[in-house]
Each structure stands twice: as structure tokens, then as C-alpha cells.
Amino acid sequence: MEFLSLHDAVAKYVNDGDEVALEGFTHLIPMAAGHEIIRQGRRNLALIRMTPDLIYDQMIGMGMARKLVFSWGGNPGVGSLHRFRDAVERGWPQPLELVEHSHAAMANAYDAGAAGMPCAFFRGYRGSDLAGVNPDIRFVRCPFSGEELACIPALRPDVTVIHAQKADREGNVLIEGILGVQKAAALAARRAIATVEEVVDGFGPRSSNAVILPSWVLSAVALAPNGARPSYAHGYYSRDNAFYIAWDKIARERETFLAWMRENVLR
């Protein structure tokens, strides 16, 4: 693990053609890291995220993605992701391959990747039509019970990026609040970057559901205050609900989207 600037962490560990997971559920969404990947002009990425929202709308709209592996996509509480829809429906700025799963499947696939397994077995997809559009969803029979189980490939991103509240001086990272799949996604990845609100001498008292990712899990830690905005970081700042509403208008048309990106991200 090494402490790097966000620019240097992306430059060193995120490559064209990579499978890239930016994870964080409801809060701690690694927005600043996504913007840095956009600024550095990465291309031909396979993006992975349980809940692609604004940051993936931006990355897709900037022509960075060839593929999206996901389990729900939208502007939370508002509606559609218009750049995502434009890529799927009209191939702008380029066609986007979709691999759709359920939340449970994605979580199990990350766990399988973290465990070094080639695939995940779980009870799921009964009564679902997803198997009809996703050839990666298979069904196998348990050799012990005879039960039919769903089976999907493990997720092993080339690089996972997460945002968290704190890192200590040794590079251990603290995550508090709502916990998504960040831990498993980092463990499953070949390389992992954590952006943090602050670097501290020690973590001190923490909530009972806190997760500490040890430094050996991570390739790099980058200081990025406000790195989750407009999502929130538990204990640091609130969600900017007004921006999620505003994004619907910004992203609806290609030119207004590109103008906003030039003014707010690419500068």
C-alpha cells in the first residue's frame, strides 16, 4: 500500500480496458475518483457497480464504457439516467453492453471473488426473467441435497475504488455507516484504491458495524475530502438532494451534459 495523490493513484492503477468497480451504497460513493478517471481519459472500460447512478451516468456519457455489469440503474429518488439510456437506446456516444443481475447475485459474486472462487452458488432467480437475457446465469444441482441452485461467475475486477471516512498513518481504512459491498469488492480486486475524507493517527471509538480494511488489501490510499459529494459521507456531510434533482435536467440533453462536464469536471 502507498499513499498517493488521487491523480497519481488513478494514473498508476487504472488502465484502459480494465474492469473497474466503483462501489459505495447510498453514501460513500467514490465521485471524486470517478471524476479523476474521466479527466485522465480512460477508455474501453467494463464498469461494475451494484447501483450505477450519477457517476456512472457521467462516465458512460463521456464514452469511457464498453460494458456495464449492474443490478439496478437510475437517479435515486428522481428517475432515469439519461446518458445511460442514450448509450443503450441510441449507441451514443458509443454502444454499451449490459450484464444485468440482482442485488443478491452481485453481492454473492463479489464474495466469491474475494474468496478466490470461480463462481458463486446461491438460492435465487426463481421466477425471474433475467436468466433469459443474461447467459451468465446458470442453474446447477447440489450433489449433496439435489437442490437446484443459481450459479454466476465470480466478480474479480482489475481495480476496485471505494470511498471511506478515514485512513490511519499505516493505510488501514475505516468505513462506517451503511455498509455495502465495499469490503468484498476490495478483497475481490486485483488492485484496490481507497479515497478518504481524512488521514488520522488512530481511529478511536467507532460504531459497532464499522469495517476496517487492512492496508495489505489496498494498493493505494488517496486523501480526497468531500470525495463522495453529492452523495453523503456518514459523520461528515449530508446528501445533496437538490443536485440529484438538478442532474435530471443537466443530463437529459447531450449538449447540456457536455457543457456541464467541461465546466465542472474537465477543467
Image: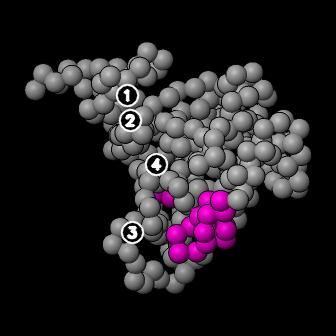
Extent of the magenta region = 217-241
Whether residue 102 is visible:
yes
Q: Nearer the viewer, residue 26 or 5?
A: 26
* Label 2 – label 4 distance at C-alpha: 13 Å
Left or right, 233 with reference to 60: left
Task: Give above or below for 184 relative to 239.
Answer: above
User: Mark 1 highlights which residue?
Assistant: 152
What residue is shown at x 10% (from left), y 26% (from top)?
145
Q: Residue at x 61, y 56 (%)?
A: 30
* Quadrant of the drawing holding the C terminus: bottom right
Q: Of the two numbered discs 3 and 2 on the same chain, state the one appearing first in sequence.
A: 2
The residue that mark 4 highlights is 185
Q: Main secondary structure of the magenta part?
A: loop
**Is 170 situated above or below 253?**
below
Instruction: State the SS at label 1.
Output: strand
**Regarding mark 4 in the picture, which secondary structure is present there?**
helix
Most extreme residue toward the left is: 144
